[in-house]
Image (cartoon, rainbow, N blue to C red):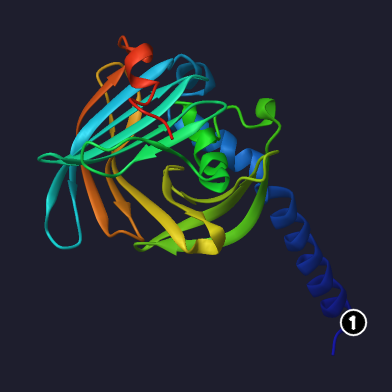
């Protein structure tokens, strides 16, 4: 065998290895491109509050109204209702409550559920300013969501919250978020830009409950009655 060819082949392989290593994206770079795909950091940080309304279709075909409020550093509230039956979840920076019974009072959220939902208080999303919140991101490999290749980004926060986001390699939109080792997942699709230039998914599918939400209305930075929405009627 020609020793020159061996040296050339080895040199070429080394050069290719160095090239792909140098061009491999880090978790921070992928998150930065995700933020840019949503309009940029300044655009996301301009969101003080968001209200989302839609129809949730359950796995058995039943349709329910769903409403969601997020107010920066103040409130996360979700209401899912059908007729007189409803489920209401309220989360603030320090406390959380849930009411599942018709006309019943609220009870405090278990500590693990409270910690899991607290990052959702930020209407810009947990990744928009993760480093300022003391969180970190790591590259957790790749996967494929509904045929789309994705980067897996793991977000770890000081209170023990851990979420893995599957980010589309082409669009840099989040297609799935997974918690507790993947046993709890939410899929996002049908991304659209609002008249104000904000980008949101208009179809949300919850893996565990088999609940599909079709978003019908999104309001950004409208007035939110925190005194009414941020407190339970009765707390246990």
Residue 11 vertical position relative to residue 187 in the rendered view, above or below: below
Going by the image, does 170 lie left or right of 62? Answer: right
SS for callout 1: helix
Can you tell which quarter of the image residue 68 is in? top left
Left or right: residue 11 versus residue 142 is: right
Image coordinates of residue 95 in percent, x first then y, are: 53, 30
In the image shown, does 84 or 57 lie closer to the viewer? 84
**Residue 90 place in picture, x, y as percent:** 40, 31
Q: Residue furthest bottom?
A: 1
Identity of the residue furthest to the right in this view: 3
- 149, 154: nearer the viewer: 154
Residue 215 visible in the displayed image: no
Vertical arrangement, residue 46 with respect to residue 193, above or below: above
Q: Position of residue 172 (x, y in %)?
A: 46, 43
Q: Can you tell which quarter of the image residue 132 is in? A: top right
- Please state the total of marks drawn on the protein image: 1
Quarter of the figure with residue 142? bottom right
Who is closer to the viewer here, 160 or 47? 160
Left or right, residue 115 beside residue 67: right
Residue drawn at x 58%, y 39% is 31
Q: Is residue 193 visible?
A: yes
Q: Residue furthest front?
A: 236
Quadrant location of the N terminus? bottom right
Residue 182's place in the image compared with 52, above or below, is: below
Which residue position is annotated with label 1? 3
Residue at 53 percent of width and 34 percent of height: 118
Q: Residue at x 12, y 39 (%)?
A: 84
């Amino acid at each position: 065998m020609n020793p020159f060819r061996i040296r050339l082949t080895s040199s070429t392989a080394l050069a290719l290895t160095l090239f792909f290593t140098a061009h491999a994206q880090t978790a921070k770079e992928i998150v930065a491109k995700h933020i840019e795909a949503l309009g940029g950091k300044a655009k996301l940080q301009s969101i003080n509050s968001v209200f989302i309304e839609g129809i949730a279709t359950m796995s058995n075909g039943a349709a329910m109204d769903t409403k969601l409020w997020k107010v920066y550093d103040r409130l996360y509230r979700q209401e899912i209702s059908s007729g007189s039956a409803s489920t209401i979840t309220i989360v603030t920076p320090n406390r959380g409550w849930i009411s599942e019974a018709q006309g019943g009072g609220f009870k405090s959220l278990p500590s693990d559920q409270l910690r899991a939902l607290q990052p959702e208080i930020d209407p810009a999303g947990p990744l928009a300013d993760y480093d300022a919140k003391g969180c970190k991101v790591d590259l957790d490999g790749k996967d494929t969501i509904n045929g789309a290749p994705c980067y897996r980004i793991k977000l770890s926060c000081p209170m023990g919250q851990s979420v893995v986001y599957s980010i589309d390699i082409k669009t840099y939109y989040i297609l799935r978020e997974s918690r507790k080792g993947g046993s709890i997942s939410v899929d996002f699709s049908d991304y659209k830009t609002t008249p104000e230039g904000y980008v949101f998914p208009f179809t949300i599918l919850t893996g565990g409950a088999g609940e599909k939400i079709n978003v019908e209305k999104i309001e950004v930075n409208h007035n939110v009655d925190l005194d009414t929405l941020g407190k339970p009627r009765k707390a246990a």
